[in-house]
Image: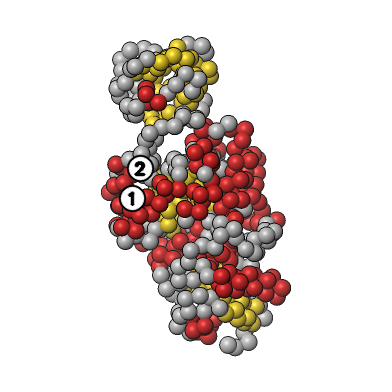
């Protein structure tokens, strides 16, 4: 296949970032390159599937293609988490008829019809009469009606067919599973050692679990950002604390929509996004965004509306799962998400009250926050074409992003990992290879890049946010430059 080429200016890509899951449908280098050209900013490696050797090959391919295209691309390692699953059932499946009694017993395999086993030995001890057990992503529901020392009887409240190894959700039940399984620990260490940009923690219940993963990554000298996946009621009960502990959040609507009343999902999604925006944390909306495109070249009207509403809610990124991992039309799905974002983003407005977040990030100084606000106002008043931010850690780029103005932000850093992490920040375009020693040379570099890209023309204004001498710990300078006027 010939090497894809981009015919659109970089500034014509959507401000909303696209996270795409890698799988058999898109893991070859030419396929990854096509998806980057179509609009992918971050690739997700789903550690619930595949071996580490294959994940390493894919990660190396992503880095190779990113370098070849001259475009930073982030990598998100998604830990599977302590998922409870059914074991081996008699005949491989059971038809659950309305009102029937099914029995959970200990063990990971059974040959008796009507018996259920799981990979979690303590399940029998933690279920109580009145608890709900949801199977097959919530399509089958069991109610606990009786229990003994080594068994629990459940009545089928919602009928369906269940099969070996399918997921088990326990809404409202406090389970004693650790935050990270042995596999999760091994995969997190692998992510640290292989330079992953983000590591997401599944089934987060408390800020302590987020901090434990941060400690582990830091111990292995990783700069990866920790993404907390919100998919448990316990996380919602401590939402502010979980969001503040994390570097970012994923609204994992698959399991969350089973753990809580599905009718609450739209409102809960808005609450999570609003909380993330209050604390300047990037937030990803995930699960079934363009699900029908696994098989169709066109999404449903409801899916398109779902993506648009997520953007209007204030999310930083939307995620594709099966659409790119195993779907028949990975590139079409990415292109569609980009189109929907481009059509929606003109309605995005500067968020009221957004000039000061509820709590400044640890590595963002108050002076820097003030400069960010000032630069936003100046850029909007001048109708600037670009805002350029020199951001060693990425915190200032994220702060500018969270002001939600529509002037594109060019992120500059001397750290490759920071450039890749900027790929998750709304409206931030990371630009590699820019000089960091002198503001005049930096402005010349961005001007040449923009004119070559077709993004800017003489007479356009650019606003630079930096520290004096570009070496200051804080950002204390805003400079306005007119393209073509000389520097």
Indicate the position of residue 420 as horizontal and vertical percent values.
44, 63
Give neighbour class at mark 2: few <14, some 14-19, many 20+ (Cα, 10 Å): many
Indicate the position of residue 487 as horizontal and vertical percent values.
58, 88
Number of marks in the image? 2
Circle on res. 188 = 1
Residue lying at 63% horizontally and 69% vertically, measured from the top left: 373
Circle on res. 180 = 2
Q: Horizontal placement of 60 versus 272: left or right? A: left
Q: Classify mark 2: helix, strand or loop.
A: loop
Task: Please state which of residues 113 and 278 is positioned toward the viewer in this rendering.
Answer: 278
Indicate the position of residue 379 as horizontal and vertical percent values.
66, 73
Q: Please state, as top left, top right, bottom left or bottom right, where the N terminus lies in the image.
A: bottom left
Task: Please state which of residues 239 and 62 is positioned toward the viewer in this rendering.
Answer: 239
Residue lying at 60% horizontally and 81% vertically, measured from the top left: 479
Q: Horizontal placement of 121 versus 209: left or right? A: left
Question: Mark 1–mark 2 contact, CB under 8 Å?
Answer: yes
Give neighbour class at mark 1: few <14, some 14-19, many 20+ (Cα, 10 Å): many
Q: Classify mark 1: helix, strand or loop.
A: helix
Task: Please state which of residues 216 and 41 is positioned toward the viewer in this rendering.
Answer: 216
| Res 96 seen here | no
């Amino acid at each position: 296949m010939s090497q894809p080429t981009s015919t659109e200016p970089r500034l014509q890509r959507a401000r909303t970032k696209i996270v795409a899951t890698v799988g058999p449908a898109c893991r070859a280098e030419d396929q990854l390159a096509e998806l980057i050209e179509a609009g992918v900013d971050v690739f997700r490696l789903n550690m619930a599937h595949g071996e580490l050797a294959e994940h390493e090959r894919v990660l190396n391919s992503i880095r190779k293609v990113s370098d070849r295209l001259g475009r930073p691309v982030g990598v998100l390692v998604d830990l599977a988490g302590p998922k409870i699953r059914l074991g081996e059932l008699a005949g491989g499946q059971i038809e659950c008829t309305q009102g029937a009694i099914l029995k959970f017993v200990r063990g990971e395999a059974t040959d008796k019809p009507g018996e259920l086993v799981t990979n979690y030995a303590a399940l029998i001890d933690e279920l109580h009469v009145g608890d709900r057990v949801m199977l097959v992503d919530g399509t089958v529901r069991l109610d606990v009606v009786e229990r003994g020392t080594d068994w629990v009887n459940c009545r089928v409240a919602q009928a369906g067919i269940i099969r070996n190894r399918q997921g088990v959700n326990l809404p409202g039940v406090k389970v004693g599973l650790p935050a990270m399984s042995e596999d999760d620990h091994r995969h997190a260490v692998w992510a640290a050692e292989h330079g992953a940009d983000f590591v997401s923690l599944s089934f987060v219940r408390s800020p302590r679990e987020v901090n434990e993963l941060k400690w582990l990554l830091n111990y292995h000298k990783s700069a990866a950002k920790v993404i907390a996946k919100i998919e448990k009621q316990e996380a919602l009960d401590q939402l502010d604390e979980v969001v503040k502990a994390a570097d970012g959040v994923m609204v994992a609507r698959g399991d969350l929509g089973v753990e809580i009343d599905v009718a609450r999902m739209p409102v809960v999604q808005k609450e999570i996004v609003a909380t993330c925006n209050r604390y300047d944390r990037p937030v990803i909306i995930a699960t079934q965004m363009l699900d029908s495109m696994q098989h169709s070249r066109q999404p449903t009207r409801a899916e398109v509306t779902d993506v648009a509403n997520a953007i209007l809610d204030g999310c930083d990124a939307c995620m594709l799962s099966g659409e790119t991992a195993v779907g028949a039309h990975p590139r079409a799905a990415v292109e569609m998400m980009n189109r929907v974002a481009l059509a929606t983003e003109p309605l995005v407005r500067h968020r009221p009250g957004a000039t000061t977040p509820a709590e400044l990030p640890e590595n963002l100084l108050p002076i820097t926050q003030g400069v960010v606000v000032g630069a936003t106002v100046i850029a909007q008043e001048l109708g600037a074409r670009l805002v350029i931010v020199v951001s060693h850690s990425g915190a200032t780029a994220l702060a500018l992003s969270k002001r939600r103005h529509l002037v594109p932000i060019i992120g500059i850093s001397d750290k490759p990992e920071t450039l890749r992490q900027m790929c998750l920040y709304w409206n931030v375009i990371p630009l590699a290879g820019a000089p960091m020693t002198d503001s005049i040379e930096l402005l010349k570099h961005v001007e040449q890049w923009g004119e070559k890209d077709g993004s800017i023309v003489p007479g356009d204004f650019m606003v630079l946010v930096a520290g004096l001498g570009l070496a200051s710990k804080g950002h204390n300078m805003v400079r306005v430059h007119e393209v073509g006027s000389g520097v």
